[in-house]
Image (tube, rainbow, N blue to C red):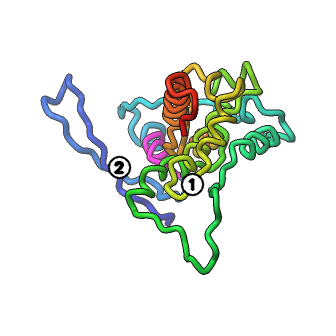
Amino acid sequence: MPPTVALTVTRYRPERESEPTWQTYEIPYRKDWVVLDALNHVKDNLDGSLSFRWSCRGPIRVEPLDYFPVVRDLVVDLTDFMRKLKQVKPWIIRKEEKAPAEGEYLQTPDQLDTYKQFSMCINCMLCYSACPIYGLEPSFIGPAAIALAQRYNMDSRDEGKAERLKILSEHDGIWQCTFVGECTKVCPKHVDPAGAIQQYKLTSATDWVKSLLLPWGTR
Ligand code: SF4
């Protein structure tokens, strides 16, 4: 006998019951089944009166990421992103390196927490594919690269903020973003690139105002 499993389902037929009840069906146990398969089995083979709604199981179409050249099937070419990533200098920049004998650069858990969210990026490129600005203007440096730049800016060990700001304040940098916010909505790692871009804009604007008020030097 093939193995079976008891599936207990709420029944409520208002024309004949005043309260919901439970009904149990003996159904085949199949490792590849999800709950919907079990319900469909009941409906098709055991009890056509069981009613349920479902929205999944429609046709599924899988396509390569939008806005990237396709290499083959679902594989896209990430050369453009890799170039942009390098541009924002996603590494710790020090004005003067410590000698190895001086030990490591230490950081408290609170200091780590300030940038941790931006370091969770897995380079999946969903944010680029969801960004209408990148779709219209491929020179836009893009959400993940800016989020990563901000990750290093907020790192207590880093001293490269001014260098990155110069790059990101250029024409293809942060100012192309119109804050549509789709990048943050689609990010599977909750990196919040849109938030990083807004932080960057604020820093850049503050820097500009300071340069007007203190033209002899702001840093
Ligand atoms: S969607 Fe999120 S995880 Fe994916 S590349 Fe963009 S920032 Fe990184």
Q: Quadrant of residue 138?
A: top right
Q: How many numbered discs, if any?
A: 2
Q: Earlier in the sequence, mark 2 or mark 1?
A: 2
Helix, strand or loop at mark 1? loop
Q: Is mark 2 within 8 Å of ligand 1?
A: no
For image coordinates 72% across by 44% down, the residue present is 85
Q: What amino acid does circle 2 point to?
A: Tyr
For image coordinates 74% across by 42% down, the residue present is 87
Question: Which stretch appears magenta?
Answer: 33-40
Q: In the figure, is residue 45 to the left or right of 144?
A: left
Can residue 185 be seen in this snapshot? Answer: no
- Which residue position is annotated with label 1? 158
The answer to whether residue 102 is above or below residue 109 is: below
* Front of the two marks 2 and 1: 1
For image coordinates 52% across by 53% down, the residue present is 155
**Is 39 in the magenta?**
yes
Q: Nearer the viewer, residue 68 or 27?
A: 68
Say which quadrant the C terminus sits in.
top right
Q: CA distance from mark 2 to mark 1?
A: 63 Å
Residue 193 screen position, x and y as percent: 55, 36
Q: Nearer the viewer, residue 119 or 107?
A: 107
Residue 65 screen position, x and y as percent: 72, 34
- Name the magenta segment's main secondary structure: helix
Helix, strand or loop at mark 2? strand
| Numbered mark located on residue 25 in the image | 2
- Indicate the quadrant of ligand 1 in the picture: top right
**Outermost residue toward the right in this view:** 71
Q: What amino acid does circle 1 point to?
A: Asp
**Is 59 in the magenta?**
no
